[in-house]
Amino acid sequence: MMQAQNLWTTLAEQRQSHTRLIVSTVEARAAKRLKARDDEIERIRIMNWALEERLRNLFMEAQMWRDIAQSNEATANVLRGDLQRALDSQAVRGGGSGDGQEDDAESCCWGENQVPLCAEEEVGTPAVEERPATAVGRCKGCREDAAVVLLLPCRHLCVCAPCAAAAQACPACGSAKNGSVCINFS
């Protein structure tokens, strides 16, 4: 009977030992899985932060582009109005004032954009041969083709396409050219 009692005690100890081994193995696996999940949560948190930062940057960039678009739209509306006034003025004049000289729209950029005159122009001798325009709407550069290019920022409609490509300044007011728009009258 003592032997049976020892056998039962040994079996109970082995069962407890085996149970502790199983529990420690399960705990180790669970701890490993929890660590992996914690690492994944941290990685996702960092990715989420980066995406939120990118979203903030994209929002600011979109706002900047929206502001630029509104500014360009306002500029286009001003140019459209100026062009319409110039065309209306041209229609009122009925094809010219009769003396062969054309009037230009008032420049918005006289001053800091004015290109300095060369030495010949300063003393009164024209650097380019002055020929009267033969018709209203003629190019002020070559005096031959129709003026179809609006110079920026002064908004003078005074040169043809080839002269606009070569011009550094507006021939009407001397303002430095920083862009041009070809106008389609048809």
Image (tube, rainbow, N blue to C red):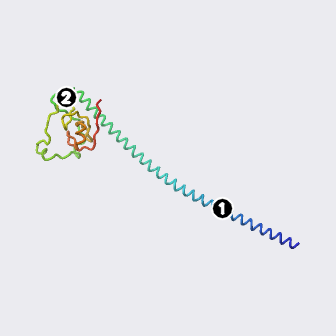
The picture places residue 141, in percent across and down from the top left corner, at 19, 38
Disc number at residue 119?
none
The span from disc 2 to disc 1 (Cα, nearest Å) is 95 Å
The picture places residue 97, in percent across and down from the top left corner, at 18, 29
Which quadrant holds the C terminus? Answer: top left
- The residue under the point 74% across, 68% down is 17
- Are the two marked residues, 2 and 1, in contact with CB atoms closer than 8 angstroms? no
Which residue is nearer to you in this view: 10 or 92? Answer: 10
The mark lying in front, picked from 2 and 1, is 1
Dot 1 alpha-carbon crowd within 10 angstroms: few under 14, some 14 to 19, many 20 or more: few
Element at label 2 = loop
The picture places residue 66, in percent across and down from the top left corner, at 40, 43
Type of amino acid at the residue the image marks with label 1 = Arg
Type of amino acid at the residue the image marks with label 2 = Gly
Q: Earlier in the sequence, mark 2 or mark 1?
A: 1
Number of marks drawn: 2
Identity of the residue furthest to the top in this view: 94
The picture places residue 107, in percent across and down from the top left corner, at 23, 39
Left or right: 56 with respect to 77?
A: right
Disc number at residue 96?
2
On the image, which quarter does residue 170 sit in?
Answer: top left
Identity of the residue furthest to the bottom in this view: 2
Which residue is nearer to you in this view: 142 or 23? Answer: 142
Left or right: 112 with respect to 31?
A: left
- The residue under the point 11% across, 42% down is 125
On the image, which quarter does residue 184 sit in?
Answer: top left
Element at label 1 = helix
Q: Say if 33 sits above or below 177 in the image.
A: below
Which quadrant holds the N terminus? Answer: bottom right
- The residue under the point 38% across, 44% down is 67
Disc number at residue 29?
1
Q: Say if 48 sits above or below 75 in the image.
A: below
